[in-house]
Image (spheres, grey):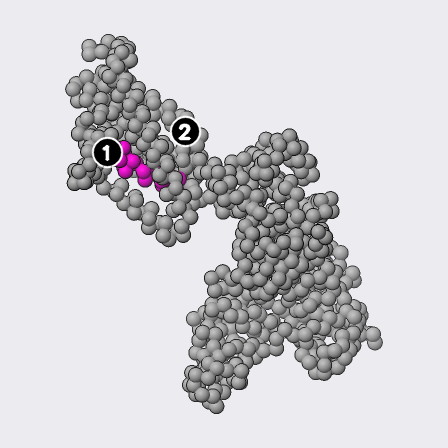
Amino acid sequence: MQEPEYIIRIEDISKSFGDKPVLSNINLTVRKGEFVTILGPSGCGKSTLLRLIAGFLKVNEGQISIAGKVMTDTPPHLRPVNTVFQKYALFPHLNVFNNIAFGLNLKKMPSAEIKKKVNKVLKMVGMTDYEERDVDSLSGGQQQRVAIARAIVNEPEVLLLDEPLAALDLKMRKDMQMEIKAMHKKLGITFVYVTHDQEEALTLSDTIVVMSEGKIQQIGEPKEIYDEPANAFVADFIGESNIMNGMMIKDSLVEFAGHQFECVDKGFGQNVPVDVVIRPEDIYIFDPSEAAQFTGTVTSSIFKGVHNEMMVLTPEGYEFMIQDYHAFEAGKKVGLRIKPFDIHVMRKERSTNIFDAEIVDKSHIRFLGNSFECENASQFAPGEKVKVAVDFKDVVLQDNEEDGMLSGEVTFILYKGNHYHLTVSTDEGENIFVDTNDVWDDGDRVGITIQPNDIWVSKP
Amino acid sequence: MKKNLWSFAGKRRNWSIPYILFLGFFVLVPLILIVYYAFTNNSGGFTTENFRKFWMQPEAMHTFIYSVGVALITTIICLLVGYPAAFILSRMDSHKSRIIVLLFILPMWVNFLIRTLATVALFDFLGLPLGEGSLYFGMVYNFLPFMIYPIYNILQKTDRNLIEAAQDLGANPRQVFFKTILPLSYPGISSGIMMVFMPVISTFAIAELLTINNIKLFGTTLQENIYNGMWNYGAALSVIMLLLIGLTSLLNSQGSAKAAEEGGLI
């Protein structure tokens, strides 16, 4: 049989816990020998995806193939994968040697061969002479090495790593990153690595899979993901960015922050609202001159080791983060310029909140599990199924949950130069998107109110 | 003076004084007295005659060996019945298992003499003979919860990640049990064995009531001697039993120390 091109093929899988969807319609292929990182904030479903590949969880829909065989319903002990667990999960009743030899013993391998293999991996992870040690007596970093050794000694087709470095301190983490990368090169097996640390992902991976809210946002090489983020979420999550609302006037001309800029993007159409992303190191900053496309005043300036990080406020009220080797002090007027290919234009994923709704009576409408007063419902019959639209800026958030018609939690914050774009997850599990000038924190509990004249009703 | 009293009461160490006094009067002094009586004769002179008597009397020796046998068999039955029960309980969601754990702990709140008398009445009602069978039934019935609870406790605390790690490394469900779950629950088993074996060795009421005094256990022999004024011989028998119990806990000490640390003991 021919060597399968893809070692892992995930087709259209969905997973929910109870009635809470965790993953929806995930498609992913991993090439043999590839180092793939699944990157996303906590709760995005990345660990669930890994556990589905390992076989600890069962998919609700879809199919998983590993090494050319469909393994959707194969129990974990029959899959050609091994896992390095986040909290190591070393067996406390066994010493280092017997922990590593666990898998080989199950295969009834002769003990001389087991000894040889265990010693080889111990050497590889730099833990020679630790065979007889109790695992409880090891430091976090050493336990992690034993956990990796225990997995790779079985020579799996795929090594799954679930945030293996999350519990280590920064210095140790950096060292281990290098070792894991070197190990991948040496072993030549496929690594699937889960992390929430974007820097770790950029350092280690051949391919990064960015996930958010149970969906894959972008798959690409690290450079591709950094330079050409597919949407505002990816841009914000990977590295620092200035993200603004903009308008694509026509091909190669975009307007944002109150100015028009030449860009290289085409095919969006005319006068289409877009998101614009500019990396802080891509804005040129200099003393005001003819060359400036626009101007601003430095509001803060911090030395960051290699570069200076400055916040610049434009007269139109937009704030930009700029990184440059030259420092401009706070209070100074500066000229700014952005080159066309450094302006990343991306289609907006949404321009307004849309919900399924049902008319209750002439002045009330029901959506998000709640009845709202509504001024625009009179031409619809009670019981009729409709769509409602609520503008991002018309959703009002309150400090007290009790003051709102609904309550929810702020789950994601995007700064857009002159306002914040928030994702608020309601207690019914729906997302509402909000534009606001108020400062909120991730995880804040809020009350949500929508005014009767801000609810727009239309036929589905 | 008043100030001195306050500072005396303020030291937390001093709060233990009442208990230390209690311990001295009701545990330490009686122990010393038992050992003293065991090594003296009626007139108070030193002798090892009491121990020799036990050694020479086949009847006492026989009762002793029989009692150890009963304790062993009871412990084994409790373990065989209790482990699966504890295992099933630990796999249930905690809401359900807590109710069931309460249900089998509940009879423990009733005095065990009353429970045992009720068992006698039950055997009478069902027309079952009282004898060795009813003895084992009574023993297991009385001591089973002491086996289940520590094992359940430790199984419930077992890290699910370890089970997944074993599966991941290629262990089928049987191997997962014998290579991880069982060895990880040894502290609970060891604690359960102690909680059953030691009290069974010294109990006499269950044997008396459930076999109408037909089967004599070591506890009964001991009680009879003391009852009949043979204090020195009775004390010697007590010392022998204490040594056996001490030996059991010594053999178990490593496991039970760990179990106590992890809350395996009740």
Q: Quadrant of residue A44?
A: bottom right
Q: Identify the residue shown where x is 34% and y is 32%.
A: B75
| Mark 2 chain | B
Between label 1 and label 2, give the one nearer the viewer.
1
Out of A453 and A327, give the one closest to the viewer.
A453
| Mark 1 chain | B
Q: Identify the residue shown where x is 26% and y is 43%.
A: B107
Q: Which residues are magenta?
A: B134-152
Instruction: Determine which residue is flagged by label 2.
Output: B252
SS class of the residue under badge 2? helix
Instruction: Determine which residue is flagged by label 1.
Output: B134
Residue B263 in the image: above or below residue A28: above
Residue B85 visible to the viewer: yes
Q: Is residue A228 left or right of residue A352?
A: right
| Residue type (three-letter) at the residue carrying disc 1 | Ser
Residue A110, image x, y percentages? 62, 32
Residue A26, image x, y percentages? 61, 63
| Residue type (three-letter) at the residue carrying disc 2 | Asn
The answer to whether residue B148 is magenta is: yes
Sort mark 2 into few (<14), some (14-19) or many (20+) by Cα contacts within 10 Å. some
Residue B135 in the image: above or below residue A319: above
